C-alpha cells in the first residue's frame, strides 16, 4: 500500500474464475449438448456464468467511478489528436538507438508469467499513482486462453473491458512484459489503445527493472520497424536483419511476424478491418495507434514544452 494515497480497489472477481466467464456463457450450452446430450444443464451453467459475470462487472463499474484518469495532454503534452508525426529519418535514428540499448541491456532472465504479472502490476500502479495521486488496485491474474483467440488470431492478448479479464495468447519472449502491461492498463480503466501502449511503455521504462525496461524498449522497436515496413511482413523481417541486433533478439523479433496460416490470414484480414473501424468509432485514430500513434506520442512527449511529467520518461 502506498502511504497517504487515496486507494481504489477494483475487485475484478471475474478474473479469478478458472475459465473465462464469457467463454462459459457462450460455450457451455454447446459443451453440455455434446457431453450430456441435454440442453437443460447447459442452460443452468450458462445462466450462472452470465449472472456471476454481470455481478462482477457491476461491482467493478461502481469502483471505477471514483477514478481520476490521467489527462494525457496535460501530463505528456500529447493525446490522440495532437500527435507530432516522426519523419522516416527520425524513426531510423530511433531504431539504431533502441537496438544499441537492447543489445547492451540484454537479459534472458525473468520470472514465470504469474510472478512477472504481479511485478508489472505493482510498477504500473505506482507509475499512475505518482501522476494522479490515486492507487488503483487491480487483479494480477492472466489466463492463456479464451475464445477471443479464435476471433482475433492476430492479437497477442486481449482484455475484456467489462470484466477486466486478461488473456495472453502468445509467448512473445522479450516483449511479454509490455504485452501484459498493456492489457493491465485496460483493466485499470484506460480503454484507448494509444493510452494503453504509451502508459505501459512509460511505466515499464521507469521501473528500473532490467526485464521490464527491456520489454518496453523491445515493443518500441517492434512498432518502429512495423511503421517503416508499412505492415509488410517480408519488409519487416528484412528491417529486423539490418537493425544490428544480437542473435537472440533478432530471433525473437523474427518470431513476432511469422507467416500466417490460411485460417489466420482470412479471419485476421476481415477482423482487422472491423477492428480498425471500431477504434475510429470510439474516438481513436484506428489500428495505427498501436504503432505510428504510439511512437509519435513518445516523440511528442520527449519534445514537449508543456508536459507536466518529466520528458526523460520518454527516453529510449
Ligand atoms: Zn489493447
Image (tube, rainbow, N blue to C red):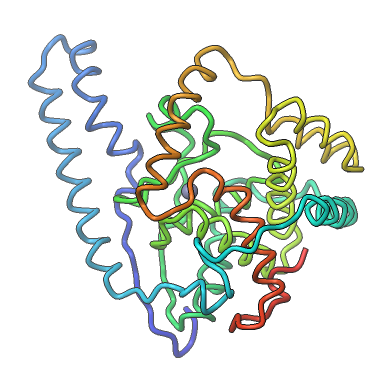
Give the residue drawn at x 41%, y 46%. 279
Which image quarter: residue 105? bottom right
Q: Is residue 204 left or right of residue 124?
A: right
Q: Position of residue 143 (x, y in %)?
A: 45, 40
Q: Position of residue 110 (x, y in %)?
A: 71, 50
Give the residue drawn at x 31%, y 61%. 11
Q: Position of residue 210 (x, y in %)?
A: 76, 60
- Does 222 appear above or below 105? above
Q: Is residue 70 left or right of residue 239?
A: left
Give the residue drawn at x 63%, y 50%. 292
Which image quarter: residue 32? top left
Total marks placed: 0
The residue furthest bottom is 4
- Does 241 appear above or below 246? above
Along the viewing direction, whichever of 46 and 102 lies nearer the viewer: 102
The residue furthest left is 40
- Does 91 appear above or below 272? below
Which image quarter: residue 312? bottom right
Quadrant occupied by the C terminus: bottom right
- Does 156 appear above or below 159? above
Along the viewing direction, whichever of 183 and 221 lies nearer the viewer: 221
Q: Position of residue 77 (x, y in %)?
A: 58, 75
Give the residue drawn at x 80%, y 57%. 90
Amino acid at each position: 500500500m502506498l502511504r497517504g494515497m487515496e486507494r481504489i480497489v477494483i475487485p475484478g472477481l471475474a478474473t479469478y474464475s478458472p475459465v473465462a466467464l464469457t467463454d462459459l456463457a457462450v460455450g457451455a450450452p454447446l459443451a453440455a449438448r455434446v457431453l450430456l446430450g441435454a440442453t437443460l444443464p447447459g442452460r443452468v451453467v450458462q445462466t450462472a456464468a452470465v449472472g456471476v459475470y454481470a455481478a462482477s462487472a457491476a461491482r467493478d463499474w461502481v469502483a471505477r467511478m471514483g477514478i481520476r484518469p490521467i489527462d494525457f495532454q496535460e501530463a505528456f503534452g500529447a493525446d490522440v489528436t495532437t500527435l507530432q508525426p516522426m519523419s522516416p529519418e527520425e524513426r531510423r535514428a530511433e531504431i539504431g538507438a533502441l537496438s544499441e540499448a537492447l543489445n547492451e541491456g540484454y537479459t534472458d532472465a525473468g520470472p514465470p508469467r504469474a510472478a512477472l504479472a504481479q511485478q508489472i502490476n505493482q510498477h504500473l500502479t505506482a507509475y499512475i499513482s505518482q501522476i494522479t495521486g490515486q492507487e488503483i488496485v487491480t487483479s494480477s491474474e492472466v489466463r492463456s486462453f479464451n475464445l477471443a483467440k479464435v476471433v482475433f488470431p492476430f492479437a497477442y492478448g486481449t482484455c475484456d473491458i467489462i470484466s477486466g479479464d486478461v488473456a495472453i495468447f502468445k509467448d512473445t519472449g522479450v516483449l511479454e512484459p509490455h504485452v501484459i502491461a498493456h492489457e493491465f492498463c485496460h483493466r485499470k480503466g484506460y480503454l484507448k489503445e494509444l493510452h494503453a501502449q504509451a502508459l505501459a511503455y512509460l511505466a515499464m521504462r521507469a521501473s528500473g527493472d532490467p526485464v521490464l525496461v527491456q520489454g518496453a524498449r523491445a515493443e518500441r522497436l517492434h512498432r518502429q520497424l512495423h511503421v517503416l515496413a508499412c505492415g509488410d511482413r517480408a519488409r519487416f523481417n528484412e528491417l529486423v536483419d539490418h537493425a544490428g541486433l544480437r542473435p537472440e533478439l533478432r530471433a525473437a523479433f523474427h518470431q513476432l511476424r511469422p507467416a500466417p496460416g490460411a485460417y489466420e490470414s482470412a479471419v485476421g484480414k476481415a477482423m482487422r478491418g472491423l477492428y480498425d473501424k471500431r477504434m475510429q468509432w470510439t474516438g481513436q485514430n484506428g489500428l495505427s495507434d498501436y504503432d505510428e500513434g504510439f511512437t509519435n506520442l513518445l516523440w511528442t512527449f520527449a519534445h514537449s514544452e508543456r508536459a507536466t511529467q518529466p520528458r526523460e520518461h520518454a527516453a529510449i
